[in-house]
Each structure stands twice: as structure tokens, then as C-alpha cells.
Amino acid sequence: MKNYHDAFARTLDTVRTQSAAISDRSLPMYQVAFETDIDVLNYALTLEHLEAAFYEASGEYDLGTDGFGNNINEWMGVVGQHEADHVTTLTQVITDLGGMPVERANYDFGVTDAASFLATAMVLENVGVAAYDGAGQFIQNTDLLTAAGSIVAVEARHAAYLNLLNLESPFPAAFETPMTPDEVLGAAGGFITD
Amino acid sequence: MKITTADQMLHELTTATMNRRRMLINAGIASAALAAPITFGKVSAQMDATPDDVPFESPVDVLNYALTLEHLEAAFYRDGLASIGREGITTWGYQDTVFDNLVAIGEHEAEHVAVLTQVITDLGGMPVEEAMYDFGYEDAVGFLQVAQALEDTGVAAYQGAAQYLIDSDELLTAALTIHGVEARHAAYIALLNGAVPFPAAVNPTLTPAEVLEIATPFIVS
């Protein structure tokens, strides 16, 4: 049975031969990374599982009201449903392509209160955007690329809102900063317990 | 009929990437993946239809398409915020930081213009220039409604065009890093307008033809 360690380990194996960044804007570029589109999709699914599991606990904290008068608990429920939808869709597409979708793992997000819940949510969403942006170049099929784009845009929308809730700029720079799988593992791997 | 999320996504794909078949044929791609039923089955009915023309002949064309939209956005915020002013925003009950955030958005669009112009030039292309625009708003409320239309269109446009950069990893990644920022802008503007910042699990995708239909009325000359 596959688990997240396997997924991440395989991901790391495939990028171990990565070259130095060849772009003058230091975009992450590799000689070898994901071998197939299924690998990229499983990488995305790993993160979506993480996010979907995280938001299941949103009802445990009183998150209050945002500066626009919206009930934050209600909207975290919406965000969580989006992540669950992404899990369902990616699992289905990977299966239809003949792949083996990674399964949900066990997580420990270290959340103790409303503030740490929203701070962790912000990290997850921003890492999610950076992960998709870093992995997009490895997708070989145009349809799957468009599908990934339609998900990452929603992650970016989530990230903007969560930044605001954490009193950060919703759009800190004119360009997103893509992350390599290594960097994503460093940022989110600690949440995975087994 | 119950529509699952996967179906909805596939509907997005099949309706928004009308030129896919032609692209794939041109690229000579005939892999087993093409036969995967859920991803491609729905397009098979279109086999006999006349394929649309590929909208872009080169990466430079794709970048100029993006630049056209970025010019539109950059001019919109630059001129609009200059004429409305900080008071024009706060008068409508928005917090003071809203004006600063709108200025930041405008600066992002200007940066996108500068970078795209530079990259197109570096690639030996001729970057499109800023045009004359008429956005038709009369006050801050109208301004923010147009802003939402522009940002939502921008996100959907990058999504629809990304596939045409698939053979150029660096340009694709660069486009994606702009795409995400447009989505952040769109979410924020939606909040200002009392709308949901993330209306669906899957962001809509627009073809170049659909985008031009939305954007062209703003372009005077």
C-alpha cells in the first residue's frame, strides 16, 4: 500500500539529479523530475489529502468573523470542501489514467487554537500554490495542465483570503514563488506522521 | 443527472480547450493516454467537427496575448486609482488599507507588463503596446465591479493559454507565477464586492476567443 512517505520518497528520487536553476529568474528547472504525468498528479494528490484532512478540524475552533463580516468557520468549510473535491478528482483521474493514487496518511498539524489553525491554513495554501507552480512544467498532457491550472487558481484564492485573515498581504509579490518538491517537503512534510 | 466533480472538471476541459485535438494531432501525439476514456472520451464525438484554428503560432504570440490583458489591467488601475483617489475609495466605506491594496495590485500589473515586454523582446518578438481604453465606470463601486471582471478574466485567460506554452518549461512556469497572483487579486476584489472569493473548487477556464469577447469592448483603439 502506498503512503505519503513513498510518494515523497519517489518524488525526491526523481528530482535528485536536478540541475542548477537555468533561468535568470531562478525558476526551478530540472533535468529530470517527475517521470510521468501520473507522478505529478500523485504529488498534487499528496498535498490535497493533507489540506483536506486539515480542514476537517475547522469546526473545532471558533474562528470568528472576518473584516468583511463573513463567518470564517463557514468559509473554512467551503475551502475544506474544495480540497476534498480536489482529492476526489485527482484520485479519479489518476485511476482513469491507469495509475495508483496515493492514499491519505496520518497527520499532526500541531494546531491548538483558532490562531494556530488559521496560521497553519495559510502555510498549507501558500505551499500548495508554490508546489503546483513548480510542478506544472512537468505535465506533458495539455488537458492535465489546464486541469492543474484550474486547481492552483483556487488554491491561490484560498491563500489570498488566509493571508488577509493572518494580517498578511493577500498578494505579497507580483509573481508567485514556485517551490521544488524538496522545498515543499521541507515546508509540509513535518505534518505527516505516517 | 448528478454531476460529479470529476465530470465538472472534464466538462471544463472539453469545453474550454476546443483546439486540443488539432494541437495534439499537430504535435503527433498518439499515446495510450489519449485513449483514456474519462479524459478524452467526450471529445471523440467532435472528431468529425471542423477543428478550430490553433490560436497561437508561437510562444511569443501567447505572451503578447497575456501582455494585451496586462496592459488593460495596468492602465485600468493606474488611471482609475488616480482619478478616484484614496477618498473616493474610503467614501464608500472601505478601509484605508483597501486603497493601498488596490495600488499594490496596479503595481503588480505594471510589473507584469514590464516583464512580459522584456521577455517578448528578448525572444525577438514585437511586444504589443498599450491601447486606449474605456472602462465605463462612474464611481468606486463601478470601478471595483470592472476590476473583478478584469481579474477573473485574467485568471481564466492564463489558464486557457498555458497549454500553448507546454513545450517551453520556463515560459510556462513564468506564466503560472503570474496566473496565481491574478487569482489572489481576483479573490480580494471579490471580497470587496461582497462576493465569495473562491466560488468553486475548479476555476473556470476561458479560450482566447472568449477572453477577447470580454475584453474587446474596453478597448477603444
Image (spheres, grey):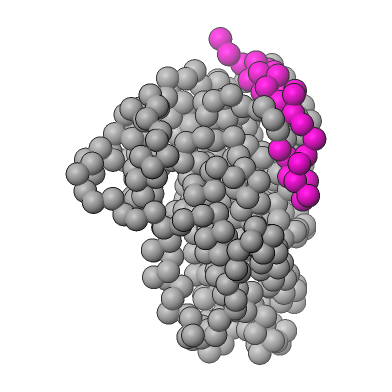
Give the quarter of the image for residue A36.
Answer: top right
Whole-percent x and y of residue B216? 44, 76
Q: Tell me if I can see residue A86 in this picture.
A: yes
Q: Is residue A124 left or right of residue B144?
A: right
- Relative horizontal placement of residue A133, taking residue B56 as reference (left or right): right
- In magenta stretch: residue A25: yes
Image coords of residue A184 (percent x, y): 73, 34
Q: For the view shown, which residue lies furthest in the left direction?
A: B48
B170 or A103, nearer to the observer: B170
Closest to the observer, B63 or B13: B63
- Res A114 → quadrant: top right
**B77 or A61: which is nearer to us?**
B77
B184 left or right of B53 in image: right
> Which residue is farthest front?
B124
What quarter of the picture does the C terminus of chain A occupy? top right
* B219 magenta-colored: no
What x and y, as percent, mark residue A187? 77, 34
Q: Name the residue rendered at 48%, 31% in the picture.
A: A90
Taking the spot 45% from the left edge, 34% from the top edge, the residue there is: A89
Residue drawn at (56%, 9%) of the image: A1
Does A159 sit above or below residue B102?
A: above
Q: What stretch is highlighted in magenta?
A: A1-29
Q: Is A11 located above or below residue B59 in the figure? A: above
Task: Out of A55 and B80, give the one closest to the viewer.
Answer: B80
Residue A8 in view of the camera: no
Q: Residue at x 77, y 31 (%)?
A: A19
- Residue B69 pos. (x, y %): 55, 69
- What is the count of numbered marks? 0
